[in-house]
Image (cartoon, rainbow, N blue to C red):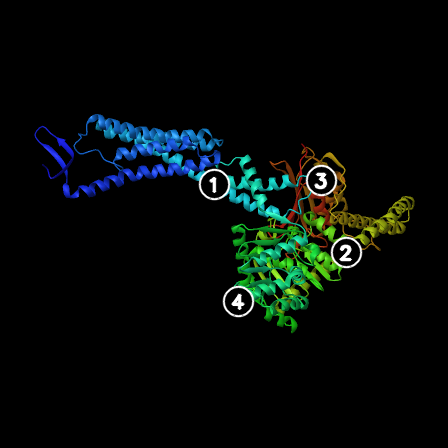
Amino acid sequence: KYHGEVEYKVVNPHITRLYVVPSANLPLYNEIIYITSDAPYILTWAGTFMLLRYYYKRTGKLNLKFWLILSIPLILYLIGSGLIFSLPANIPYKFYYRLIFRAGTIGSSVLFGLAFYVVSRKLTAARIKDYLAISAMGIVPIGIANEISALQQTYGVAAHSLVLLASYLFTIGLYSLVISISQDSSLRKSIRNSALEVSKLADVIEGPGKEQEIERRVLTSAKEQEEMLIQETGVRSSLTDHEMKQYLGTVLKEIKILKNVDEILKKGKEILESSFEFLVCSRFGGLRLVYNNYLDMYAKVLDKYKKKEHKGIRMVTSITDKDSANLIRKFLEIGVHVRHAKNMPPIDFAVSDKEMIATIEKAEGGEENIKSLLVSNEYPYITHFVSIFEELWKDGTDAWDRIKTIEENIEPEIFEVITDPLKASQIIVELAKSVKLEAVFLLPADRSMKRVDRLGIIDHLIKASQNGATVRIICPLSEENSDIVKRISTSAPNIRILNGHNSTSGFLIVDSARFIRAELRESSAKEFAEAIGFTLYSNSKGSVDSFKSVFDLLWNEHMINEQLQKADEMQKEFIHIAAHELRNPIQPILGLSEVMRSKITDPEQIGMLDVTIRNAKRLRRLTEDILDVSKIESQKPLQLNKEKFNLTEILLNTVADFKNEISIDNDDNNNNSKNINPSIKLELLSSERDVIKVEADKSRINQVITNLLSNAVKFTERGNIIITTQKTTDGLVIIIFKDAGSGIDPEIMPRLFTKFATRSNTGTGLGLFISKGIVESHGGKIWAQNNLDGKGATFSFSLPLST
């Protein structure tokens, strides 16, 4: 009637609107309906099947219950959707038919959720159970809501709102499930890689707990990897500790460690015989082992290569001398392709297209040093070692050219900028091992010695010194590296070590022929590779000589400084002894002179005794000053007899004594009288009522006050000398001496409180140095400045007040 199929109608009071699909477009329309409605259902079913099958295989075999639960929803949907067969056209599509069909599709959604539930019951991983439960809670309401809205449009809004919530739950559950599976794979890969690395150390780990130690190291690494994955995704892996241990046991069975040399040779022959391509990376010792045992097999393989039945043998090695050159020539003559590599990796290995072998210990020196061999046919290991070989092959030089260089005794010039810290670590180790005649080593920081010791460089230098090489090291010395220095001095006493200064770079020069220089990037780093930055490696004679000159300059400077320090120490020791010896006879001279003066009446004799007593006192003060200076310079604390006293009394008494002693001595020989100089006036702006309590050594503080007053009197020809005191809010008292003398010479000012800082023709220049030491030993400070009016200077010192 309508030349098509009515799909939808809208009924209004006055008009009914029909939506008709034309007959010509019905096949295309039905095709679109099938694709948009059936494809998502089938894809959902397939995805559910794959995930549940994966977990069913982990928990047990695929039983009949699994197939029934997954098959019934699919069969119901295929029948109800008309994909398998359609209802006859003459049968009306009545309400009860729709009801039965919708009930079947709703049931299929419930069965999907039931499938998740059945599988999750058998899982031990609680997290996977949770993810499956979330997915089930999402997948069931999606189907129910869709079918209810199709059955009765009245429920459309509510049903489709439920679809949104259910879709969210299903998506979250499915996402977490997939991420968890992905993390399982990553953790298994991490366990496998860690097992390989720990297996390399199998000979190092000794004792009854060897297996437990291997397990601990691998699982610790796996746990760290798991925490990183959790931080990145927010989802935890489903692998339990027990499952990790089980998988580790499986991996360790796949990695076979050979420990017998005969077994190693046998395995090497087997891999070579079965290979279609063979790559070798080995040092001199390993190649000599091959040459002595199965060089003929190499020749047979190379015959296959000539017949195009094999891809040949390529070899990377280090050709360092005539012995290694002669050995490599043998391999070259039978057709092996060989290249020389400057920096060999720490292990030797060989790789075929099917299997790989790698030495755990280096094969230097013959069979005795080959302790074990790692064998694996795992594709990731083979790929890894092939990539290492190709990198070495690309950077290597032709073996014939290298042999020619050695035979003609020509060393090609190298000037290489290294940005890879691991490569720099390998080079410096190789340099340290190659020392024959001399090594000079500049380390930029005290911790640098610990870092190079971890690389084994110190042991190589000790060995070189024991073999007769000259080794010199400049390094800042501290508690950080004292144990290493002690070990060096014990094992190799001929190694000379000087205490250096911190610097931004260090270098090692070997036999005046090669050097490596590295910048210090991170001084607190634990490992050498983490600490260094820009690195240079060269055998250029000009560069080597330049760095050698720098080292010699630093070495000579430190040697001179050490000699000066020793001479200074000897001088101080001599002065200290001399001062002690001088002080002993001074006291009886002074005492007996004063006794004689009290008993005679002749003015001339009294005058001569006064000169003797005055000069004896000066000599006593000088010896005491020298002893004080030696104590201060040795950084030994001054002996202080502290007591609480009133500082004002000391100031009043000292000023009174100076007022009595200020005089002009016109002629010690002819005029023995002392006259008070009327041009100088001492004034203390303090009274007996001003109580300033301090806890200090009274005689030492009196010595400071006397020194400062003596200087003020000495440099003041006329005018006032004023002494004042001030108390501060932070518990200090400041004593100020202001004179009207000539002031402080600008050249003297920067070193005013050092030894011998004086322009006076009298005095030793030790008074201010000693005063500074006394004040600072009491916790105070001393300072000075010229007066603002240009007349005289002001000296001040502070002391803590007594509480």
- Residue drawn 76% across the image and 62% down it: 468
Residue 227: x percent and y percent?
Answer: 51, 39
Q: Amino acid at mark 1?
A: Gln
Q: Residues within 10 Å of mark 3 (few under 14, many from 20)?
A: many
- Relative to 368, say whether 114 is above or below: above
Q: Residues within 10 Å of mark 1 (few under 14, many from 20)?
A: many
Q: Earlier in the sequence, mark 2 or mark 4?
A: 4
Where is residue 265, by image quadrant?
bottom right
Instruction: Give SS at disc 2.
Output: loop
Instruction: Give SS at disc 1.
Output: helix
Query: From the viewer's perspective, is 683 left or right of 221?
Result: right
Kindly check if marks 2 and 4 are in contact, taking CB atoms under 8 A apart as contact: no
Q: Earlier in the sequence, mark 1 or mark 4?
A: 1
Q: Label 1 belongs to which residue?
A: 183
C-alpha distance separating marks 1 and 3? 83 Å
Where is residue 182, by image quadrant?
top left
Instruction: Give SS at disc 4.
Output: loop
Q: Label 2 belongs to which residue?
A: 493
Q: Amino acid at mark 3?
A: Leu
Q: Label 4 belongs to which residue?
A: 307
Q: Furthest residue to the bottom?
A: 408
- The quadrant of the picture occupied by the N terminus is top left
Q: Label 3 belongs to which residue?
A: 651
C-alpha distance separating marks 3 and 4? 112 Å
Q: Residues within 10 Å of mark 2 (few under 14, many from 20)?
A: some
